[in-house]
Image: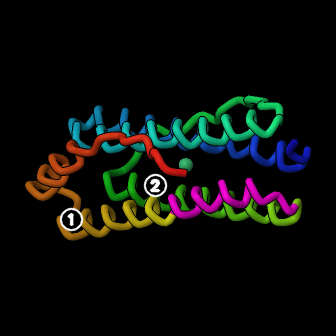
Amino acid sequence: MISAKLEQAINKQINAELYSAYLYLSMSAYYESIDLPGFANWMKVQFEEEQFHALKFFTYLADRGGRIKLEAIDKPVFEWKDSLDVFKETLTHEQHVTSLLNALADVADEEKDRPTQNLLKWFLDEQVEEEASAEKIIKQLKMIDGKGQGLLMLDRELATRVFVPPTTA
Ligand code: MG
């Protein structure tokens, strides 16, 4: 059985992961509207990843005998200036998620809850990748000045991304 404090904190994180999914789906919609299907695809994969994260916490909390309580998901923004603006927000958002996971890990430490500490190790490792991939695309967008042929080439590359559910952890 999980402590009430951790139960509440994990419920909050489920909501945060679902908000992340919703934000990326909104970014995907933005890219559809400016005819960059590869970027739209990349964001759709982000959406699927975040849903996977929410479900991972969901299943974990159920397995630990906690009660899952779903809350309202905030409305995401839907307009951006350009691609660089979108990816800067992606990076800022992922940095925020990392801080939420660190705070959750602090609660798990206080509660001396080893299984939750293990679970969060997986999530924190995942965040390193999330931040790195946003940073990489920001650098590439800057290289090509966010437009022209370079942008179309990057769009084609991002079109190849597919969602692969992690099998480990
Ligand atoms: Mg996530």
Instruction: Give the residue at mark 2.
Output: 90
Residue range (magenta): 112-127
Q: What label sits on residue 71 in the rendered view?
A: none
Q: Nearer the viewer, mark 1 or mark 2?
A: 2
**Residue found at the far right of this picture:** 4
Distance of mark 1 from mark 2, alpha carbons? Answer: 18 Å
Evaluate if marks 1 and 2 touch, with contact meaning CB atoms under 8 Å apart: no
Magenta: main secondary structure: helix
Rendering coords of residue 81 (x, y %): 36, 50
Any magenta on residue 114?
A: yes
Q: Amino acid at mark 1?
A: Asp
Q: Amino acid at mark 2?
A: Thr
Query: Which residue is pictured at 64% across the width and 36% down the height?
Result: 74
Q: Secondary structure at mark 1?
A: loop
Rendering coords of residue 49 (x, y %): 46, 42
Instruction: Give the residue at mark 1.
Output: 145
Rendering coords of residue 160 (x, y %): 21, 44
Q: Is residue 84 left or right of residue 97?
A: left
Q: Residues within 10 Å of mark 2 (few under 14, many from 20)?
A: many
Query: Viewer-proximal residue, 11 or 39?
Result: 11
